[in-house]
Every structure is written in C-alpha cells, then in structure tokens.
Image (spheres, rainbow, N blue to C red):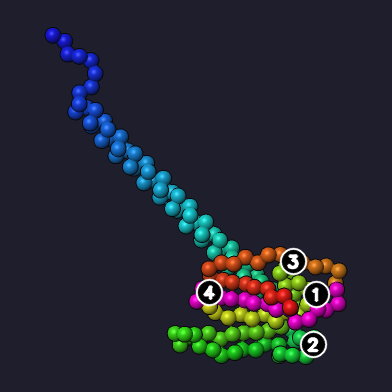
Amino acid sequence: MRRAAGFTLLELMMAIALFGVVALLVYGAARAGVDTEGRLATNHRRLQSARAMRTLLQDALRNARPAVRPGPPAFTLEPRLSALGEPADRLSFVAAGASPPLTSDADWLVTVEPTPAGLALTAKPLGVRAPTGRRHSSPVSRDSRSACRRLDP
C-alpha cells in the first residue's frame, strides 16, 4: 500500500509556526524603521528651527542700535525669576532689520526670554523709517524648543 502524497498535519503546523515567526521579525524590523524615521524627522525640524532662531538672533544683534525715535535704551535687561526660582531674565534691544522677517523699513524692539519650551524671541516694530525700495516678508516657523513672533503695530 502506498502512502498518499501531501503533507502531514505536523508538517503543516510547523510551516505555519515558522511563517508566523518570520512575519513577526519582518514586522518588528519595519516598525523600528518607521519609528527611527519619525524620530529623525522630529530631530531635523528641531535643529532647523534652532538654526533659524540663531540666524534671526544674530541678525538682530548685528543690527542693534539706539532707536531713531526717543524711547528705551539700546539694551535693557529685566531681572526676573521663573516659577521654580531660577533666573529668567528678559533682554530687550532695538535693532534695524536686515533680513526677513525683520524688515529693513522699521526699527524693531526685540525681546529675548526663556520659556518652559525654550527660548522665545519677540520682535515689535517701533516706527517706520524712509522706504528703501525693498520689502521682505516671510512666515516664521514655531517649534517646541524655540518660538519667534513678529508683532505688527
């Protein structure tokens, strides 16, 4: 008597179990890749925002000067404490804008202060100077580590 062709129940169960193990390994590797990509994208956005904040602050500090109109002195340091009792001083100064978003047609009151989310930079126009024939405008991005706001008069 000949044995029927095909697989035994034990062989089928072993194949299904082996397939399940391989599928779990593939799923785990794919999930790790997706998680890594998400973390890298978040880190890239944070670094890009910090770079933009640094560039904006460098531009404002390079163009710091006394205001054309009488008002606050060139640099003002307001000593403050955070809710935890740590120093949270606020630095304010007047700058002539040179690159976006601080346009060159106005003096800007720039305020830099720490926040729980990071460093906050706020710029408010003080007065419009004579037009230079060139006007810049660009959106300012926000990030959990830094914030930059342009306040219109």
The answer to which of marks 3 and 2 sits earlier in the sequence is: 2
The secondary structure type at the circle numbered 4 is strand
Q: Are marks 1 and 4 in contact (CB under 8 Å)?
A: no
Q: How many marks?
A: 4
What secondary structure is the magenta-colored segment mainly? strand
Residue linked to disc 1: 105
Please indicate whether residue 46 sits to the left or right of residue 15 in the image: right
Residue kind at label 2, given as amino acid type: Arg
Tell me, for residue 118, which label it has, or none: 4
Residue kind at label 4, given as amino acid type: Gly
Q: Are marks 1 and 2 in contact (CB under 8 Å)?
A: no
The answer to which of marks 1 and 3 sits earlier in the sequence is: 1
Residue kind at label 3, given as amino acid type: Ser
Give me the residue at 45% from left, 53% from top.
36
Residue kind at label 1, given as amino acid type: Asp
Viewer-closest of 6 and 95: 6
The answer to which of marks 1 and 2 sits earlier in the sequence is: 2
Give me the residue at 72% from left, 75% from top.
152
Tell me, for residue 137, which label it has, or none: 3
Q: Counting other residues with Cα less than 10 Å from the Cα at mark 3, is it few (<14), some (14-19), or many (20 or more)? A: few
Q: Which quadrant does the C terminus fall into? A: bottom right
Give me the residue at 64% from left, 77% from top.
122
Q: CA distance from mark 1 to mark 2?
A: 14 Å
The secondary structure type at the circle numbered 1 is loop
The residue most toward the front is 153
The secondary structure type at the circle numbered 2 is loop
Residue linked to disc 2: 69
Q: Above or below — where is 1 with respect to 115?
A: above
The answer to which of marks 4 and 3 sits earlier in the sequence is: 4
Please indicate whether residue 80 sits to the left or right of residue 126 in the image: left
In the image, the segment drawn in magenta is 116-131
Viewer-closest of 50 and 9: 9
